[in-house]
Image (spheres, helix red, strand yellow):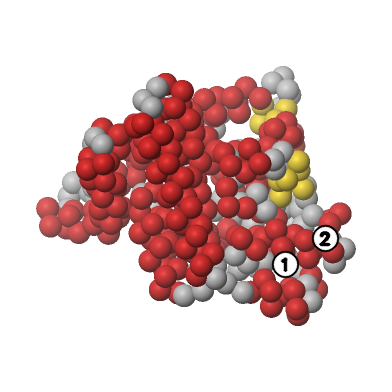
Amino acid sequence: MRNLPPISSLLNDAQIDRLRARSDLWGGYLVAHAWLVIAAACALFIWIPHPLTYLAAVVIIGSRQLGLVILMHDTAHNALFKTPALNHFCGQWLCAFPMLADMPTYRNYHLKHHNRTQQDDDPDIVLTGHYPITRASLKRKLWRDISGQTGFSQRKSQLLHALGSPDLRAGQRVRFFWDQLGRQTIANLTLLLIFAVVADAYLYLILWLVPLLTWQQLVLRIRNIAEHAAIRDRSDPFGNARTTEVTLLERAFISPYWVNYHLEHHLIYWVSCYRLPLLRHFLIANGFGEKMQTEYGYLAVLKKVTVDDEDSPSSSGGYRAQGTFGTGFEAS
């Protein structure tokens, strides 16, 4: 870890003991909550098929899809459930695989981000290291997200990689595809089957894939921006990440499951997401409140990470991204 203060310098023993406590009930509740909200949004549109209920469903489902990614993130830190086997199973089959992800693969990548936060070799530096950017550039990025261009490009790249090299024999390509996307395919075929049995198979396309490729991508980017873009000091553990205080609407549609408490997460990454507000309370009570980089609302964050179009963002000392996971969409 880079420049992280000892936990004992941040918290007392009683506070640490409270934060270490993990709960299978809490973990199960949050995973169930995400899926029940998704089911309710689907049911609303099936019950009242109207453009407004469809728009609501896309936004609600896309937000909970981000919620599944957040809960997968907690399982990658072995923090969501008390029972390791439950943590792994739910992290994979109920969070990662439906989202075409793999939790252990994500864990290996993500821990490097924690070890090298905002340094030149941070694997996430490409996401936000080039900020601030012009407002025109941000608008182009957000439009590509909400219009599905970013998500389609990412999924296309993922699928082409999973299909393997044409030089591989058929059996080798099947095994390679299974290793890359096999379980994710089973999870999504299960969702397709559920839609077909409950109502109609085409609903998988419009109520799962469309939110995945549009709203989920948009709020994923906004969340990434809020966490590390245009931070105060990349060498300061209290300034190389940002916590965003949010409204109830922002929590519901942009930052579910306490993901907005990102600075606290970086200070002590093993704290469960449902205990991050308590961690913040302890840190403020212990006198660290003024040191912690905090913003109030995502609109304020987006204003902070952008400059007038005629200004040059490169003068800020930021990094110019070369691309994100093969999308080719990050340079402008």
Residue 308, placed above or below residue 202: above
Q: Residue furthest left?
A: 170
Q: Amino acid at mark 1?
A: Leu
Which residue is pictured at 44% across the width and 33% down the height? 57
Asked where in the image residue 5 lies, by quadrant, the reply is bottom right
Query: Looking at the rendered structure, which numbered label has been put on residue 284?
Result: 2
Q: Nearer the viewer, residue 95 or 157?
A: 95
Residue at the extreme front:
47
Provide the residue designation for mark 1.
Answer: 4
* Location of residue 179 (image quadrant): bottom left
Cα distance in 3D space between marks 1 and 2: 17 Å
Tell me the quarter of the image containing the C terminus: top right
The residue at 42%/41% (across/down) is 40
Q: Position of residue 67 (x, y in %)?
A: 51, 49
Q: Given contact means CB atoms under 8 Å apart, are the residues at marks 1 and 2 in contact?
A: no
Report if residue 325 is visible in the image: no
**Circle on res. 81:** none
* Left or right: residue 174 compared with residue 137: left
Q: Tag 2's secondary structure?
A: helix
In terms of sequence position, does the residue under pointer 1 or pointer 2 come before the other? 1
- Residue sitting at 36 percent across and 25 percent down? 49
| Point 40% across, 73% down: residue | 85
Query: Is residue 199 toward the left or the right of residue 3 in the image?
Result: left
Q: Position of residue 209 (x, y in %)?
A: 35, 37
Query: Nearest the camera: 26 or 159?
Result: 26
